Image (cartoon, rainbow, N blue to C red):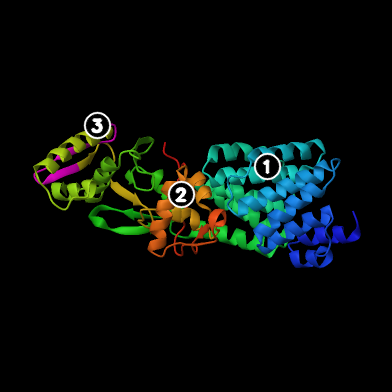
């Protein structure tokens, strides 16, 4: 490797893409193409970066398997940053195996880290945690160690383990001081914001509301309170959890009763909240009796639903307090906004993968949000991307369709 390539590589490792390009911008050999691709990625031109990395992979000869594998890893990182979640994970895995065979421990760890980030992004937290345990920390330079700790914190946040998340971020903060890369330092700083901004709303008796940090949400879930959890559509008390995620009518009834506790909720209010009807007739009352009966059966381990003169009331069996844990913002398409809230541009297909939904469903949600001015798009065809400025004032952690502790 010649001196210009070495100097450019060192500049990129230090987070100086302009310095790297000054040395190799006019060169089109394989190594220069690869470094130019990484430089363009650091500058934010992801489309150009992907094209350069692919050209570099083709330009490397058949005996340069390690160089081609490194290009695949770099391209996977570009795809992840550009929220292209459909990139072939098998290609990254094959590249990692090649790097392992040739003893490139740093890039093996980086490939594993990218795989974990993708799994975390699409909500496969258990699998991400298992893969992260396979990352060898010993060879990682400060920048990679910072990225590793950010992923550890991300997993802890999604599991509502705020102490573990804060500890990981403190380690990341220490590592990034040695890395001396401003963009990475900003990412660590932004990660701390998640722990220090409201994540949910607590609704108590009498309709009183207050904002909760993630740490306070964690404490609430560990308390003795009877919780109607509108973030995950479950009802819980201590270790017993009843999921109503697929029963929207029953959950609407449970939430209305929870907000009314210790009093009762009128039949008219329950009908309006559960059925969306402004008018009440005998058919609505009959349907309400049926649905309340179903809810009573579902909640039998935790509470009873008793009839009163004007409606129904929730009667916990052991808890002395009933609260409703609500999302920080009530939005029909909150999960879509939560992903777009990271400030990155997303394709419809990537959102569908992350949400575990169909592209048509996601497109309808995006059209609705665009009509209300909450998101905007740019590009055309396959290059169409959606984004919105990050939501200010609260963290979107509890809006994400990821498996928070439910039992």
Residue that appears at 83% across and 63% down: 24
Residue wearing tag 1: 112
Residue 218: x %, y % from top left: 44, 47
Residue 112: x %, y % from top left: 68, 42
Give 215 or 405, whichever is nearer the viewer: 405
Relative to residue 42, is residue 135 depicted above or below? above
Does the image show residue 287? yes
Q: Magenta segment range? A: 300-313
Residue 120 placement: quadrant: top right
Residue that appears at 66% across and 37% down: 90
Is 289 one of the magenta-colored residues?
no
Q: Earlier in the sequence, mark 3 or mark 1?
A: 1
Query: Mark on residue 400?
Result: 2
Q: Earlier in the sequence, mark 3 or mark 2?
A: 3
Q: Is residue 279 left or right of residue 56?
A: left
Residue 186 placement: quadrant: bottom right
Gap in angstroms between the C-alphas marked 3 and 2: 29 Å
Gap in angstroms between the C-alphas marked 1 and 2: 23 Å
Q: Circle 3 — which element?
A: helix
Q: Circle 1 — which element?
A: helix
Q: Is residue 292 left or right of residue 328?
A: left
Residue wearing tag 3: 297
For the residue carrying disc 2, how many other residues have a C-alpha within 10 Å: few (<14), some (14-19), or many (20+)?
many
Residue 372: x %, y % from top left: 38, 63
Residue that appears at 31% across and 49% down: 324
Give 168 or 280, whichever is nearer the viewer: 280
- Quadrant containing the C terminus is top left
Q: How many marks?
A: 3
Does the image show residue 212? no
Q: Is residue 233 left or right of residue 56?
A: left
């Amino acid at each position: 490797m010649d001196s210009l390539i070495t100097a450019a590589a060192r500049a990129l490792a230090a987070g100086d893409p302009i310095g790297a390009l000054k040395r190799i911008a006019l060169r089109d050999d394989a190594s220069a193409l690869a470094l130019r691709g990484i430089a363009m990625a650091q500058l934010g031109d992801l489309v150009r970066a992907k094209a350069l990395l692919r050209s570099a992979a083709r330009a490397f000869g058949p005996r340069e398997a390690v160089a081609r594998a490194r290009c695949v890893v770099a391209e996977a990182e570009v795809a992840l940053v550009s929220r292209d979640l459909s990139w072939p994970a098998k290609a990254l895995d094959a590249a990692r195996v090649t790097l392992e065979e040739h003893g490139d421990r740093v890039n093996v760890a980086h490939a594993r880290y990218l795989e974990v980030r993708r799994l975390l992004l699409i909500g496969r937290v258990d699998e991400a945690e298992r893969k992260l345990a396979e990352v060898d920390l010993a060879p990682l330079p400060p920048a990679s160690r910072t990225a590793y700790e950010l992923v550890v914190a991300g997993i802890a946040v999604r599991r509502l383990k705020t102490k573990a998340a804060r500890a990981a971020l403190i380690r990341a903060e220490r590592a990034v001081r040695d890395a001396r890369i401003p963009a990475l330092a900003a990412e660590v700083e932004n990660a701390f914001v998640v722990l220090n901004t409201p994540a949910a709303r607590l609704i108590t008796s009498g309709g009183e509301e207050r904002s909760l940090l993630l740490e306070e949400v964690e404490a609430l879930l560990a308390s003795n309170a009877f919780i109607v959890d509108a973030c995950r559509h479950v009802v819980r008390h201590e270790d017993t959890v009843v999921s109503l995620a697929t029963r929207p009518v029953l959950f609407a009834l449970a939430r209305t009763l929870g907000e009314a506790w210790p009093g009762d909720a009128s039949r008219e209010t329950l009908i309006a909240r559960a059925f969306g009807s402004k008018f009440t007739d005998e058919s609505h009352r009959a349907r309400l009796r049926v649905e309340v009966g179903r809810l009573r059966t579902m909640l039998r381990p935790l509470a009873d639903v008793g009839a009163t003169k004007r409606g129904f009331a929730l009667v916990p069996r052991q808890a002395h307090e009933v609260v409703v844990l609500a999302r920080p913002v009530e939005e029909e398409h909150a999960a879509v906004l939560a992903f777009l809230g990271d400030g990155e541009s997303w394709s419809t297909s990537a959102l569908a993968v992350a949400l575990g939904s169909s592209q048509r469903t996601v497109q309808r949600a995006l059209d609705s949000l665009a009509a209300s001015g909450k998101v905007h798009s740019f590009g055309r065809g396959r290059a169409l991307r959606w984004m919105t400025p990050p939501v200010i004032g609260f963290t979107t952690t509890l809006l994400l369709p990821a498996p928070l502790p439910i039992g």
